[in-house]
């Protein structure tokens, strides 16, 4: 029986914070919010989480930040069309890889152990949940909009008035998707490293 929804917003590297959120199914209230950094922190969280088999877990796909030199390549990577012909773009250092494989071994291990684990893409989920603002992604104005929208539109009254870390806000989005998955209101949009990537 599923008793908790777990959302994990995974950072692209250990220098970028990850966020975790846990909600109760019965009340819909957040019971745990935390910041994590290294994969050993994430492993320690799941090792000490007692309701692992009774939870629906949604983990975000972090962007792959390993890049070639040049600022324009950093910005173009997320919007570049991907072709099957690698000679067309000379895919040196696998620069067309959009998502990082960070944490895939841990998540595959949880899935193989019988846990209900799915992946999600934060920005696609925000669009489907009408949580996408006109501000620059992850800017302070965007974070304030997201926090206010989660409080007012989705009933997270327990969120504080002061600014929360964006990783925790994105983890809350993961709990919303986990709830929708339990209600069978999600669909698989693609597969990443053996795990389904879901969206509404």
Image (spheres, grey):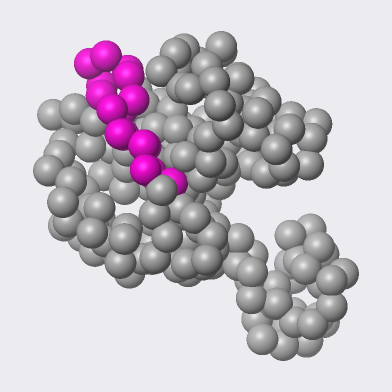
Q: Is residue 98 above or below residue 25?
A: below
Say if residue 191 shows up in the picture.
no
Between 83 and 90, the residue placed more toward the observer is 90
Between 53 and 189, the residue placed more toward the observer is 53
* Quadrant of the image occupied by residue 22: top left
Question: In which quadrant will I find the N terminus?
Answer: top left
In percent of width and height, residue 86 lies at 73, 82
Q: Is 22 within the magenta?
A: yes
Q: Is residue 38 above or below residue 157?
A: below
Q: Is residue 155 left or right of residue 54?
A: right
Q: Is residue 57 above or below residue 128?
A: below
Magenta stretch?
A: 19-34
* Quadrant of the image occupied by residue 156: top left
Taken as a whole, is the magenta stretch helix, strand or loop?
A: strand
Tell which residue pokes out farthest to the right in this image.
Answer: 72
In percent of width and height, residue 122 lies at 57, 43
Tell which residue pokes out farthest to the front in this image.
Answer: 162
Which residue is rendered at x = 39% and y = 54% of the image? 36
Q: Is residue 6 above or below residue 115?
A: above
Q: Is residue 15 left or right of residue 67?
A: left
Q: Is 133 within the magenta?
A: no
Which residue is rendered at x = 65% and y = 28% of the image? 144
């Amino acid at each position: 029986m599923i008793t908790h929804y777990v959302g994990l917003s995974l950072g692209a590297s250990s220098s970028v914070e990850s966020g975790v959120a846990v909600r109760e199914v019965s009340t819909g209230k957040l019971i745990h919010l935390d910041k994590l950094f290294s994969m050993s922190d994430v492993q320690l969280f799941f090792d000490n989480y007692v309701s692992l088999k009774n939870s629906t877990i949604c983990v975000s796909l972090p962007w792959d930040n390993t890049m070639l030199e040049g600022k324009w390549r950093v910005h173009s990577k997320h919007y570049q069309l991907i072709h099957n012909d690698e000679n067309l773009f000379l895919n040196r250092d696998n620069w067309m890889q959009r998502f990082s494989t960070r944490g895939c071994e841990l998540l595959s291990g949880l899935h193989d152990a019988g846990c209900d684990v799915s992946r999600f893409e934060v920005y696609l989920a925000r669009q489907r949940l009408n949580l996408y603002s006109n501000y620059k992604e992850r800017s302070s104005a965007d974070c304030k909009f997201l926090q206010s929208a989660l409080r007012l539109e989705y009933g997270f009254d327990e969120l504080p008035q002061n600014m929360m870390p964006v990783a925790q806000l994105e983890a809350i989005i993961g709990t919303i998707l986990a709830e929708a998955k339990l209600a069978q209101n999600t669909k698989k949009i693609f597969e990443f490293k053996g795990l389904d990537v879901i969206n509404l």
